[in-house]
Image (tube, helix red, strand yellow):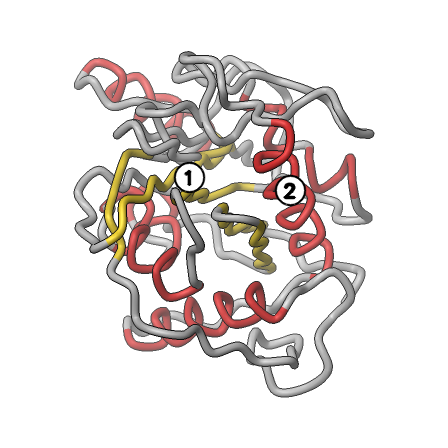
Amino acid sequence: MRTASLFSWVLLASALGLGFGGCAGDDAAGTDTDDASTSASASATTTTGGSTGEDSSTGDGATTGDASTTGDGSTSAGTTTTAGPGTASTTGEESTSDSGTSDGSTTGSLPEGCSPEAAELVELVNAYRGENGKPAIPLSPSLCTVGAIHTEDLAKNKPDAAPECNLHSWSDAGPWSACCYTADHAKAKCMWDKPKELTVYPGNGYENAAASGGAITPAQALDLWKGSPAHNEVILNEGIWKDFPWGAVGAGFYEGYAVLWFGVEADPAG
């Protein structure tokens, strides 16, 4: 059963000293970025549903969790997530595309809620998946909306400011459930439920997050997550994520924060 296997992985990771949650230094939905080297300091976090006793499920009976990295070298995941400080090499001016299609490519008008940067990141993710023999994931307006809201909340309200809170945290300044996401994943449901709280998306959401002292481009964010084994597995559906075929992906950028959201279900919004 996927829920049991994920929970076992979380317990093992905890025993090995891996962090889970969205706090600085604990975890990031997807993977940790402690081992990512870049020319500009940045932190990446990903959280992906680790089983925490909550009854959230992906619709097919498998519960998933969230993963987020907070730049402190920890990872959090319902499945597995890591986060840690990383450096990302800048690649010059960022190129953006103003279009997006249901197959993840950005060649038309952008779906509502998806910024050019979000569409570019999804396009880069799908190109990277293609290089590794993985199918493209449809660009999700709903998950883009969640990503846009979360990055703005992180930048303006700093819910991860407390030492124990990571980048998967949410403030109490909006129409969503607030939480301090900690390394023990006690608040995993806080992440999983965000797409359902904020959009018409019917399933759980799993997040990779990154933060930089300055601007961060889609290419830099992806490089951070690619450099973190845990986050990389989320992006490529490998390791504990192999039984979670992504049916939707979205992203958000705001003032030095970048997030990437995955979901198993297709997005009814398009």
**Percent coordinates x, y for residue 35 in the rendering:** 17, 42
**Residue beneath the point at 36% across and 41% down:** 44
Residue at disc 1, secondary structure: strand
Three-letter code for the amino acid on which mark 1 is drawn: Thr
Task: Identify the amino acid type marked 2.
Answer: Glu
Task: Name the residue that disc number 1 marks.
Answer: 46
Residue 187 placed where, x, y %?
Answer: 56, 17
CB within 8 Å, label 1 to label 2: no
Provide the secondary structure element on which disc 2 rests. Answer: helix
Task: Report x, y in % for residue 254.
Answer: 58, 50
Tell me, for residue 152, which label it has, or none: 2
- Residue 55 shown left or right of residue 109 in the figure: left
The image shows residue 250, relative to residue 229, as above or below, that is below
168 sits left or right of 60 in the view: left
Q: Which quadrant of the view contains residue 28? A: top left
Q: Which mark is residue 136?
A: none
Cα distance, mark 1 to mark 2? 17 Å
Residue 127 vertical position relative to residue 175 in the rendered view, above or below: below
* 75, 180: nearer the viewer: 180
User: Would residue 102 appear left or right of 39 to someone viewing this image?
Assistant: right
Q: Residues within 10 Å of mark 1 (few under 14, many from 20)?
A: many
Residue 1 makes an appearance in the image: no
Q: Earlier in the sequence, mark 1 or mark 2?
A: 1
**Residue drawn at (57%, 56%), measured in percent from left and top?**
251
